[in-house]
Amino acid sequence: IIEEVSARNRIFVESFIGSLVDFAFVNAKSLILEIEKSKNPQPMQQLAGNAKWLPATPTIGIFETACNLGFKTPSSGSKELENERLDTKIVTVKEVDDIEPSTCALISCLRLIASSSIRLNFSERRRKFIDVLNMLLDSCKKLPILITVVAVIRKWLTEEDGRFGPLTRGEREDFLWKMISFDYHDLPQVASNALSDMVCITAMGACGYNLTQLQHRPNDVQNNAHEFKISVSQPSQDILRDQMIRKLFVTCLLSANFRLRSMAVVIFGTEQNEVKVACDSLESICARDVLTGNNSISGRSPFDILRQLLSADYEGLGKRLWTTIFAEILLACSDHSDGAYLACKQSEHQLFEPREKSKTVKRARGFLRPTQYQASKQQVLHTNRNNDYILNTTYSTFQKAILTERARKRFGRGRCLIAMRTLIHGCVDTCQLIFCCVLKAAWQNIPTNERRASLIKPMESLLSRPYHAQFLKIRENSRINAIQSILGVILHLRPLPSLDVFLIRSLASNYSCQREVLSYFEQHFTVLKRNGLEVNISSSELIQSILHVYKTLGDDDMIVSINSSLSTFKGTKFALSLDMYGFVIKSTDAYLALIDRVDGARKDFAPPEFELSVWEDRWVKGYKELSQWHLIDEFAASHGDPELMMECAWKVKNWDKVKSLCASPSVIASLVDGDPVTKMSEIFLAIHEGKLSEVENLHAQTAQLCLHKWQLLPSIGTDSNPHKVLLQQFQRLVELRESSQVMVETSSHSSGRTIPDLKNLLSSWRHRVPNSFEPISVWEDLFLWRQQIFDAVTSNFSWSEPGTLATLHDRPWTCISLCRTARKHGLKEVSMLSLSNLTECAMDVQDAFLKLREQVFTYRNATASHLKGGLNVVNSTNLSFFDARQKAELFRLKGFFLDALNDKTSSNQAYCNSVQICPTYSKAWVDWGNLCASLFVITRKKADNQPDAKLESTKKSNQYLAQAMGCFLEAVRCDASEHSRDRIPHCLSMISNDGAQYGILCQTLEARGVLLPAWVWLPWIPQLLTSLCRIEARAVKSIIGEVVKDHPQAVYYSLRAFFLERRDVDRSRGQDADSKDEESLLSVKYAELLMSNLRKLHPILWSKLEVILEDLIIRFRPSYEAELLATITALLQKASSRVELKSSKEEKNKEEHSLLESYHTTLKRIGMKFFNKEKPDGSKSRKAVLFHAKYASMFECDFLRQQTGPNGAVYSGPASIPELVERLKRWKLMIEYQVSRVPSSCKLQEASPSLAWYSCEPPDLWAGACESKSFTISKSLNEYFPARGNELCQVSQSSALVAAKTSSHAVMMAANSEGLGGHAGGGAGVVEIPGQYAPTSSGMLDIRPFPELHAKLIRFEPTLEVVTNSTKQEQIVRRISMLGSNGRQYKFLLQLAIPYWTRTDERSAQLHYIMGKVLRKDIRSCKRCVTVKPKVVIPVAQRMRMSSNETSHQSLENVFHKIQGPSSNQLISHFQETVNDRLREMKGADDATKAKVKLEVYQEICNEVVLPNFFTRYMTEMIKDADHLFQFRKVFTSQLAANSLLQHAFALVERTPVRFVFCTKTGQMISQDFRFQYNQGLLDKHKVPFRLTRNIEELIGPFLLQGVFIPSFVSISSAMNDKRSIFEPMLHILLRDDIISWYTSKSNPRNDHKSRELEVQLSDRIWKNVGYVQERVEECSARLVEDASKEAISENPDPVDSKVRQLISVATNSDNLSLMSATFQAWL
């Protein structure tokens, strides 16, 4: 009633002001109390990390609410959160329409009071009303009330004349701050936009823009186009300069209301010098219609806009992604008057345009400019503006729309930009991309560097604002905060702004942008270095900041490499190299020797302070690994390091010191800084002192600190060391909580004299241990605390019996596990120290045996006296307490010591006793086999020295080999573990010692090979198939037959291709075959028999596979033009490389004549292949006839027609090599034109209807669903459930596992009886995606394949792609996509290739498979997360294969083509022609002159044509996010190290840019065309060991080169060298098959007998190649050091990885690169 009357008579309300104020105060207070009571208090452990959700922009909140994408979990009893999951209409009805009476009364009361004169009178009533408004703004969560309060404040804020209202300065600032910092967390995302709009209206009203009417419909822009009534007043300058007003106005720029935001952008764009323009211009701006696109900012330069943006205050948007404002403002000020145009690349036929020569640019004030990174001439052209010119591309429809808009003269209105400005508010990724583009453009358009430099200070000021940390209080959907966003864009600015190093360094750890900061620092470092500044010194702020960031990331390799580069003493570099590769004992000795040398006070040895600190820090870290805590404690006390003293104190059980340190100021300061490790020490102390009631609270506080640190970490990558550290701390927190519970439980039971049940806890602790490759310090952090808990438990139950007491702790297992891990890390002292803790500890027989075993192991790999000591320990052991398996292990160890002491006979007897005691103990069989193999070597050497007894010695040595083979195969039969299966290649390698007879080795393989599980042979299928051509064919046939039965799809493709290949060889012999030589046909007969068996055993599967392969072979063969183009291109490259001037004319004519004869022979073969006149036309297809008619006569005229020269000589084809090259070029261009007309894609239905119609339903995934019948019935029970865990520990299987085993077997038997599985069909008859068996597929566990888990072929994708072959750029191939049952697409290229190439790729996959197995077991490689994966290559026919290929696979050639346009082949011709022209002018140039000319031309191409950073530019465009790009670079670098090692060790064929293939998603290197370089059958060396050209080096950067590439290279080499004895036979069979295949490809096909003769002739060369590879691997591994302390203080100590560093210098040397073949393209 009062409100209605007051509407007519404003004075009426004055009589009730006092009552209204009191009513408002009481009602508001009760409302706040009700809200507080409705909140559900949660315990602190549940609040940990429970940050509230707030989207990056309000618009995203609306979208996610509409799509139900918000991930906020509602708490029990919270109705507001439940309402947020409803749609917009329901939320509006519940929170606006259905208002409670008390709320309505409060709203009316507020309105009445606001309309009264109370605002003008400074009375108690006014103060009370101000308190009510403050109270509601602080705590009220009801939107109607908040909107009313904001409306009241808006009315009181300013007067109509533009001056401040009646609020005091303090009241005004208080209200404005509350509106700026509104907490939208607990408000619905959609409905809260009404409040946000009211705040925006208030801000605009304060600036002179009065919106008198507003309908809150933010999504309906068109209906709201004319619902605003705007009046403009001239505000006072005080209001415009008010800081709070400006902060509040900035929040309007992120409003979800499109119209309000657009008006705010226009208003923001009119501000100049922080003062508004005249009132009349404001009215004209507000009169614009935002829907017509005229709301852009005009008349402002990018410099002015950037300065204004950088100077703005975004404190009110600290929880949002305020960089969206940057993107929109910069888009709004862009010039779009000429409409939109599409851009296309330059024509590929256009010649290279040389880049601008780089000029010397000094470091300007405030920014950096790379001298080598001058922009190239523009490589992007606009499309023709003619309406008739429309490209036939993917974007042709879009281009038509643009041209139509232009024709109708409707362009230039900015509708596209409006759409983009709206889109960036709804998608964070899109916003970041556009932000990067517009900021780069604005930065480049600033006219002078001085003006750019003037923006540095505002940029630094903006980055240093503390309000950016508000993002930690919320939980965003976006993975990027504002600091990450702006730093990620700064990385792309050129010239690079030179920001304050300490500022950027502080941002790294405070805003989880470590990788962005590192990328910036690396660019900064590179630019400074290229400008001639000395930055690689220890005093450099930049290098120290880089080191600091890597320390926060915990990247030890990078830390060591940077310290090494900053060190001046070679002894420091030597010690750091030992430290890097895990030589802990030797590195600590080296550091100690260096420190002692300083303490000796020698005047000639004065190291810098930096190196002294490095020695001490690394010495402390090394002694932590050696568990020397007492010495570390003394060091910490002498240096006053409280954190280190705290760590030592609790580990040495000095709890008094821990207690005193917890009260020290330095420790308290670290707690204030949020160090969870220090806080954890308080938990240790509380548990030790029995204050168990405090543990829960301390645990929750520590969890909060850990979660806070987790939130500041970058995204998880391949090698996320800080995440590992925090996860380990979380694990320790869990165990600390469990420890407190154990102490509570044991205390209660001890007082009652009862025994608690701790079995479950101890069992969980056994399974909760670090990885085996983790540092020993990580293991000790966990195990030392466990031992203290075990000591406390033991002391509480000292009254119980020893046997009972042993069940309450797990000290023996803990100590033994730590001992085993330390032994594997090469720390024998730590191992012995751990075992010494078990001197007075009761343990069961199993633990006692494990302790004895570890004690014996400490004597291995030592001197003769230590070996005898180990043998004495074994001999003195009482075996009566142990079971058969444990006794067998002790006899095995005895045999090892006797063998090491060269007592072969006693060793043989010990191994014999071991396998007699336990015949199924595989390790004993393996070691016995190794002994027999060593006896073979000894006997063979004696036979070589005694020619008279050679026959008898050979027979005896073969018997040893047969025994070794029998032992190895028996080991696999007993236990098919990786350790046993590694000897299978040795068995295949030793068969060659049988010679030409089917001897004892073949008989052993035949007898025992079939007893093994079939799946163990899968990685060696290629060798088994080639063995069908050898003397052991009969034995191998049986083995392959078992594989055919059990795993048909693993062998089908290779077996089919092998059969067709050998059949062709047999047919090619024709009538020349010797009918008596039946053995020459055995391989064909055996292969045909195996194919027949496969067809009989698996008829349904065979029929499906045959139909698919027949279609692939017939319908997807490349066209005749494509084949001819590939052939001509290969011949052209070969001929072009021969165009080189000789020193003498006679030499030139002689060589040219022989080359022409060779090329003529090749051309005749090409003519016979493509234009065979003898073949009747009726047998040719229509395409073949047309092809013959079009090209046959021209080919014969150009290359085969006989001519008579001037001297009367008759020759065929071209008369000289240059003429031949010109004709080949002409043919290449002609065929290229025809091939280029092929469409890039087509429908599969048109190419192959049968494949398009193929469809299959995936089978059920129960165990054995896809197994063959023979495998399911005979071997499933033994192999499907392999034994797990330690083979020496017999752990009883749970009832659940037994039940699973029984039920699974029952299901398999039922399925077989019903005909659902086995040979007849079912799961075994379903076609799988090829390449899912070893060696083309490898995982973390190398175990038996489970076909039911393999992806099944569901259908083929309907679109067939036509792409350029990645290895042969001129070859057009088809890419077919298969859809698997796992929902993933598998893409394969259908390529033509000779059999040698396909077999080489198979061997490459085997090599990567072997290498992956070695790396998985190596501690150093696992620590660095170094892995390799094989490439899938599936043979389809003799000359056709399927090669796995993804769209993300790119070659260096493709990268160059996409960045610089033309093909790099033009550069090859340019290089060759330029070199020949200059040599021709010199006449009679020697080798040195030729090398000088090549170097000059090479440098010209590098400086003037090819960009030095096109690879980096491409990856920057592909991966916009700086964090992901940094991770890619790191993974790519480690993968490149593995690939480079293989290039160097195996002397690969030139790694041209076409063969340098990588994955842009994962960084994995793809081993493309992995073929070896032979010179008369021997591996040939290259001048350049591997490809590390300047663009690759630029992408990697100097820090990753030193800190990732070199350590990864050396670690892989060391891992392979450590497995030298296992690796040698693998190398032998791989290199044997490769060289024979290489010889066969160079000559006529050979039958089996001739192939065996060839193998005998090449035997010596094969073993030389094996030695060559092993020598290369050994020299690249970490050098062994005898006396590290002595070498560290010597005059010139070399790092242990010096060989790899030399190889890098050779690979990057310009002189060496210029001498490489032109096809290598060293300039890329």
Image (cartoon, helix red, strand yellow):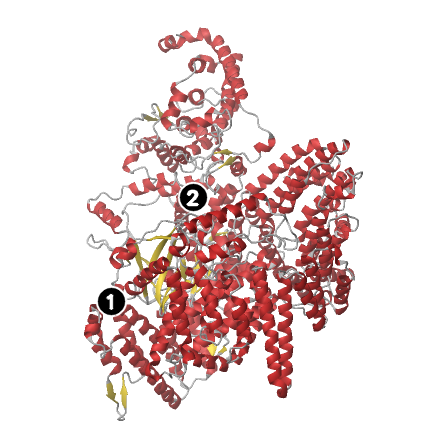
On the rendered structure, is 902 left or right of 720?
right
Q: Which quadrant holds the C terminus?
A: bottom left
Q: Which quadrant holds the N terminus?
A: top left
Give the structural element (helix, strand or loop) at label 2: helix
Vertical side of 804 occupied by 101: above or below: above
- Residue 306 shows which numbered tag? 2
Q: How many discs mark residues in the rendered view?
A: 2
On the rendered structure, is 615 left or right of 1584?
right
Q: Earlier in the sequence, mark 2 or mark 1?
A: 2
Q: Residue 725 at x, y = what percent?
A: 61, 47
Determine the residue located farthest toward the front in the rendered image.
1313
Q: What's under tag 2, amino acid-wise? A: Leu
Residue at image location 54% in from the left, 34% down from the top:
50
Give the structural element (helix, strand or loop) at label 1: helix
- Residue 959 shows which numbered tag? none
Mark 2 vs mark 1, CA separation in Å: 52 Å
Q: What's under tag 1, amino acid-wise? A: Gln
Examine the image and state in which quarter residue 393 appears: bottom left
Residue at image location 21% in from the left, 55% down from the top:
389
On the rendered structure, is 1466 left or right of 858?
left
- Nearer to us in this view, 43 or 1626: 1626
Examine the image and state in which quarter residue 1364 appears: bottom left
- Nearer to us in this view, 95 or 731: 731
Q: Residue 1365 at x, y = what percent?
A: 35, 64
- Nearer to us in this view, 168 or 202: 202
Q: Nearer the viewer, mark 2 or mark 1?
A: 1
Q: Residue 1186 at x, y = what percent?
A: 19, 70
